[in-house]
Image (cartoon, grey):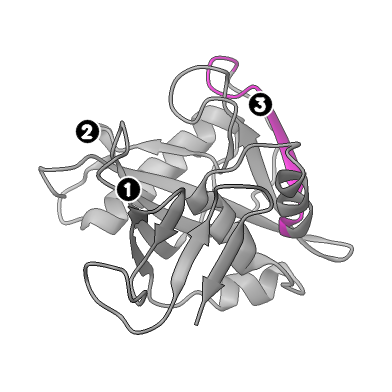
Amino acid sequence: MSAMMPVGGTVVLVRDAPDGIEVLLIRRPDRGSFANGWVFPGGVVEPVDARPGDDEARIAANAAVRECEEEVGLRPHGLQAISCWVPPIEASKRVRTWFFLAPAPDGEQVLAADEVADARWLSPEAALAAHAVGEIVLFPPTWVTLNALSGAPDAETVLGGADVPELYATHLVGDGVFIWGGDAGHPEGGEGCHRLETASLPWSYVRD
């Protein structure tokens, strides 16, 4: 792991729903990181997550499993890395966070009162629609992940389609515009457009 930036792991639990899929979103309390925001279960790597021979992604996956069990009482298995998010330099707390997909495990949800104010199984489309009208608070990594999962026909398709995890090295330009690799305005270069405009609702994501 890098000594320069803490690392975290987040797990997107996926299950079948009548019209596609649902994912588990939890609402953070009105204090601390992501206050009142709806996020996927997860947290920062702790020493217990680092085992001999594990690379950063594996250690982040260990953290995601542990945090999910602590926060909602569900222990996921079969995690597949889908993305790694590096916050912009303007962020007050910078944690490089790996996102993983996993099938929803059996068991009853038990919410950690000090870390989780609420939890809901929602379709990606329903979560994005609620955000678009200001009913819930989302942050860019969650929003982009939900957008990518929109329209999925079933959990098997989602879980079987995971490929090489994508790096999202985030930069802020203008008023609430987040850009990533491939965008012409990104420091790493690019000729296209890969950005999320968040100055007003609904947010607008463009990638070409």
Gap in Å between the C-alphas at discs 3 and 2?
Answer: 24 Å
Q: Residue furthest right?
A: 18
x 50%, y 17%: residue? 31
Q: Please state which amino acid type lies under the numbered disc 3.
A: Val
Residue 121: % across, % down: 75, 45
What is the number of the mark on residue 87?
Answer: 1
Residue 38 seen from this side = yes
Q: Which residues are magenta?
A: 113-124
Q: Alpha-carbon neighbours of circle 3 within 10 Å: few (<14), some, or many (≥20)?
A: some
Identify the residue under disc 3: 110
Image height check: is 194 above or below 92? below
Looking at the rendered image, the disc whose residue lies closer to the viewer, 3 or 1, is 1
**Secondary structure of the residue carrying numbered label 3:** loop
Q: Please state which amino acid type lies under the numbered disc 1.
A: Pro
Image height check: is 100 above or below 26? below
Quadrant in the picture for residue 173:
bottom left
**Secondary structure of the residue carrying numbered label 1:** loop
Magenta stretch encompasses residue 188: no
Identify the residue under disc 2: 47
